[in-house]
């Protein structure tokens, strides 16, 4: 099976030659270009953007990091040349560097990874290599921050393209969350109830900045992943009357709903509106206050796609990620993290048809890994995560060759005080046990 990038190149070429009659489709023909083209376009426009792919319509905040230009030799190098250079640099560095590849990363980069997994699995994998001088994170910005928070101070965490942020993580910034917190404190006060439960516990998804993890650490809150969100919410309800959940409304809603929280008690907080767009009464009655954030990759999935999969393949097993909207999760056979999806496919003994609602690079890889099954993405349009896609083998070759030359480029560092508080929230998550 060809990689997502190869499929995009073919579709774009066919579309240019045959127009509307081309087989297959992608959400942007610009995906066929090198990401340095978008880096340059942003530099010329003076404003950051997420680039083509699922997040292209999201507005990147001015503070979003931008990547300077990649040296010309890496842009001009052929695939074969980049492959040889990456392999040579990796061999020279040996144990001095560890390369991490996220499930959603393109195959052309993942092939060089020492570990492949979700963000938290990768941060933990890096801990098994305490002697590595450099951790090259082929994922996105918040993942590199978590790796820096958990790794040793002398280890350098490197993000090959600084423009590889995350549109969802950017939807909740520290200032807006602080403002929200102040307004909530005015309404609820800070005193615990008769059972010792404080008015609000902040819960942040792993897909958030280190500053927000630190905010949770400082305010009695906790971090969750898509694997342990239920356990974390139970932990929070033991200690608080309600939860402020950010940045992903869908993971918050899907998890709280599964725990029996009624939708009427889950108001949405829009940071651009006074009281988040709610009246005081709704907030007083709330159990979970959902931040107005979402993942643009998972927002693409809808119920019509599931209905089509069921019509085309009777008996199909539909599994979606809990970052998908509630209606999609409700219509699927099951929902769970990337780890859950992978394990469900691995556990199927008979040849099965799986329709999967998560990022296309991971779905494609699963399809290649399990040829005995029919595995396809629910979304027929090839539309990868914009920010993961910013990492191209050219950037990986560059950061590795710089390391060989004794230079660290694109280092991601988290302030010591932020690290300390973020670690508190992460440690609470690790200590939370399912009931
Ligand atoms: S898939 Fe969604 S949440 Fe994950 S990095 Fe991309 S935009 Fe962010």
Image (tube, helix red, strand yellow):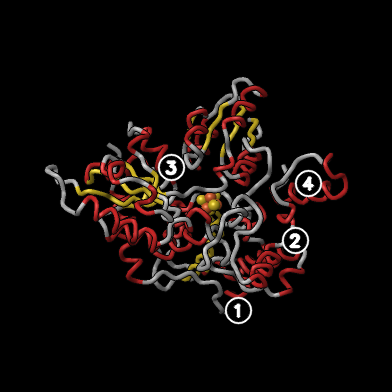
Name the mark nearer the viewer: 2 or 3.
Answer: 3
Q: Which residue is mark 4?
A: 11
- Asked if marks 2 and 1 touch (Cβ < 8 Å), the reply is no
Label 4 or label 2, whichever comes before in sequence order: 4
- Describe the element under mark 3 as helix, strand or loop: helix
From the viewer's side, name the closer residue of 323 and 351: 323
- Describe the element under mark 2 as helix, strand or loop: helix
Viewer can see residue 175: yes
Name the mark nearer the viewer: 4 or 2.
Answer: 4
- Mark 4 C-beta to ligand 1 under 8 Å: no
- Mark 1 C-beta to ligand 1 under 8 Å: no
Residue sticking out furthest to the bottom: 406
Residue sticking out furthest to the top: 314
Image location of residue 140, percent across then percent down: 53, 59
How much space separates mark 1 and mark 3, taking CA atoms? Answer: 43 Å
From the viewer's side, name the closer residue of 189 and 5: 189
Q: Which residue is mark 2?
A: 79
- Describe the element under mark 1 as helix, strand or loop: loop
Q: Which residue is mark 1?
A: 405
Label 1 or label 4, whichever comes before in sequence order: 4
Label 1 or label 3, whichever comes before in sequence order: 3
Q: Which residue is mark 3?
A: 251
Disc 4 crowd, CA 10 A, few/some/many (<14, 14-19, 20+): many
- Asked if marks 3 and 4 touch (Cβ < 8 Å), the reply is no
- Mark 3 C-beta to ligand 1 under 8 Å: no
Image location of residue 182, percent across then percent down: 29, 59
Disc 2 crowd, CA 10 A, few/some/many (<14, 14-19, 20+): few
Label 3 or label 4, whichever comes before in sequence order: 4
């Amino acid at each position: 099976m060809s990689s997502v990038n190869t499929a995009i190149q073919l579709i774009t070429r066919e579309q240019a030659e045959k127009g509307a009659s081309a087989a297959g489709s992608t959400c942007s023909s610009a995906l066929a270009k090198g990401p340095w083209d978008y880096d340059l376009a942003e530099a010329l426009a003076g404003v950051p953007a997420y680039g083509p792919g699922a997040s292209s319509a999201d507005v990147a905040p001015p503070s979003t990091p931008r990547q300077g230009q990649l040296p010309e030799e890496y842009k001009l190098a052929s695939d074969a040349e980049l492959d040889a250079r990456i392999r040579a640099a990796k061999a020279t560095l040996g144990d001095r560097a560890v390369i991490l590849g996220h499930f959603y990363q393109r195959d052309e980069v993942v092939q060089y990874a020492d570990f492949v997994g979700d963000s938290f699995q990768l941060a933990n994998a890096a801990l098994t290599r305490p002697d590595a001088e450099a951790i090259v994170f082929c994922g996105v910005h918040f993942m590199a921050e978590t790796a820096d928070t958990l790794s040793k101070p002398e280890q350098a965490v490197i993000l090959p393209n600084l423009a590889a942020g995350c549109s969802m993580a950017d939807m909740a910034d520290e200032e807006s969350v602080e403002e929200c917190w102040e307004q909530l404190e005015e309404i609820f006060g800070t005193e615990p109830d008769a059972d010792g439960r404080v008015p609000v516990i902040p819960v942040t998804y792993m897909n958030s900045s280190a500053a927000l993890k630190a905010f949770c650490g400082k305010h009695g809150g906790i971090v969750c992943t898509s694997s342990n969100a239920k356990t974390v919410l139970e932990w929070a309800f033991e200690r608080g009357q309600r939860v402020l959940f950010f940045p992903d409304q869908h993971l918050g809603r899907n998890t709280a709903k599964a725990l029996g929280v009624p939708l009427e008690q889950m108001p949405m907080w829009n940071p651009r509106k006074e009281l988040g767009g709610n009246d005081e009464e709704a907030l007083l009655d709330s159990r979970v206050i959902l931040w107005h954030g979402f993942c643009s990759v998972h927002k693409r999935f809808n119920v019509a796609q599931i209905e089509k999969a069921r019509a085309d393949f009777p008996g199909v097993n539909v599994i979606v990620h809990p970052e998908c909207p509630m209606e999609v999760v409700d219509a699927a056979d099951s929902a769970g993290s990337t780890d859950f999806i992978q394990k469900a496919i691995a556990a199927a003994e008979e040849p099965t048809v799986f329709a999967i609602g998560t990022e296309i690079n991971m779905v494609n890889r699963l399809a290649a890994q399990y040829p005995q099954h029919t595995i396809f993405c629910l979304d027929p349009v090839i539309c990868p995560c914009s920010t993961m896609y910013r990492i191209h083998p050219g950037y990986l070759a560059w950061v590795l060759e710089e390391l060989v030359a004794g230079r660290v480029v694109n280092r991601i560092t988290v302030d010591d005080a932020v690290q300390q508080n973020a670690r508190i929230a992460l440690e609470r998550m690790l200590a939370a046990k399912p009931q």
